[in-house]
Image (cartoon, rainbow, N blue to C red):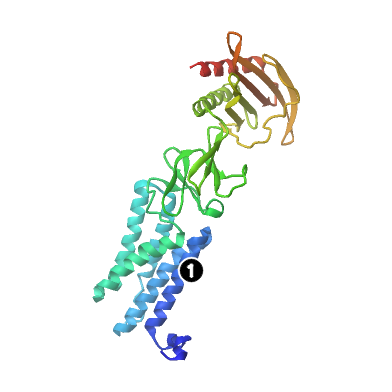
Amino acid sequence: MTWKDSFGAILWKDKGARLYCLLLLGAICALHSGLAMDNRMCRFACIVLSPLSFYLIARHVTSCTGTSEKNPMVGKLWLMVAAMVIFFCAQRHAEMWRVWMLVTSLSMVAYVCWRTFGKQGFTGICILAIAYLGILLPTVAIGYNQYACIKYGRQDFYPLGPDNILRIKDLKTNKIGLRDRYGMLIEPAYENIVPNSRVIPLGVYELRNNGCYTLYNVYQNEMIKSNVSDRNLQESICQLLRKFCDGHDYGYRDRVEVRVTRKFNSDALLSHVKMTGSGVFSYNEYPDRPFISEDSVTLCAGEFAIDTIERYGDTYQALHYSYDVKRGSVVLYNIDVKTAKENMPQQETLVELAKEIETLLKQ
């Protein structure tokens, strides 16, 4: 090449070089879209770049063969756009729905490429175009391999934190898990997963389930901390509290909190559940800040404490009860129960709840 050609003049002389540069530019745009994982950018790149690349290849092939047909993409380009829309929307689906959507998308791309290139004798170009336009380019554009983790759909179109970790959802159980660009990290078994705000290191996420959380370090691929030590007890108390709230008319924004501590050998937090009523069903809370009220005095076993608190501009009556589980004269566990309602809770209901938790501890 001459110096002028080396600095870009060849783009005005060589149609092949111009095509390669345009396709490369599209691939670079898809790459940076996938790296950023911005929802709008990924959607635009996925839906636009494959049809645009197909248009450039088809126009080049037409001009090289000397076909008199001015626009070989009439009646075909919209199929490419539709195929990419199906490919992008398949992310939220799972199992056979995802499989059939991906197969449909690839089949539409294959049909268009065969009609455009295969019938003209360009079998090699047809095969390469199907693989590139139907699989590789849209996969790079969305930033991850959605052919992996077929069993679970993507929960939302926004990644978590600076690490671009994706939440995936089991559509049968509504449980949440984690995956990266290439495959599974955490199986869906949690109510929610959020970026961590409790410890300093980056790449740490809170795996929330049944009112407790576990910290997961994505860089080291390990669980590093949990706020309770007995997961089975935590789950049992969660189920018990849901029945308790439903049976005692805990309505919108009413609250109940249970803390179970082991007292013999060494103090250890076995279970800590914070639950809020929503008018229809109860849900768990996870913040570390005081949930109902701060303790100003130490409550002895068997005693009650009454308080009035303000929440969201409303006044709630809080009742606090402490109960020791003993074996003879030895205190084994302490059960600490707090509730807050617009009407003063009955003391008998908290005693009943503590007795039911004691039964769980003795099982």
Whether residue 345 is visible here, answered yes or no, is: no
Question: Which quadrant of the figure has residue 120?
Answer: bottom left
- In percent of width and height, residue 125 lies at 29, 73
Q: Nearer the viewer, residue 236 or 250?
A: 236
Report crowding for label 1: few under 14, some 14 to 19, many 20 or more residues within 10 A (C-alpha): some
Is residue 51 placed above or below 68 in the rendered structure? above
Residue 344 x, y percent position in the rendering: 70, 21
Q: Give, as a three-letter code, the residue at label 1.
A: Cys
Quick check: 215 left or right of 321? Answer: left
Rendered residue at 44%/37% (across/down)? 173
Q: Nearer the viewer, residue 76 or 153?
A: 153
Residue depicted at 69% across the width and 21% down the height: 320
Quadrant holding the N terminus: bottom left
Residue at the extreme top: 328
Q: Is residue 257 visible?
A: yes
Residue found at x 56% / y 54%: 162
Tell me where residue 335 sits by quadrant.
top right
Secondary structure of residue under mark 1: helix
Question: For mark 1, what is the residue?
Answer: 29
For this view, does 125 lie left or right of residue 23? Answer: left
Q: Position of residue 17 (x, y in %)?
A: 40, 82
Q: Position of residue 196 (x, y in %)?
A: 59, 44
Using the image as rendered, state which of residue 108 and residue 207 is in the foreground. 207
Number of residue marks: 1
Q: Nearer the viewer, residue 274 or 5?
A: 5
Compared across the picture, whether 148 is left or right of 243 comes to left
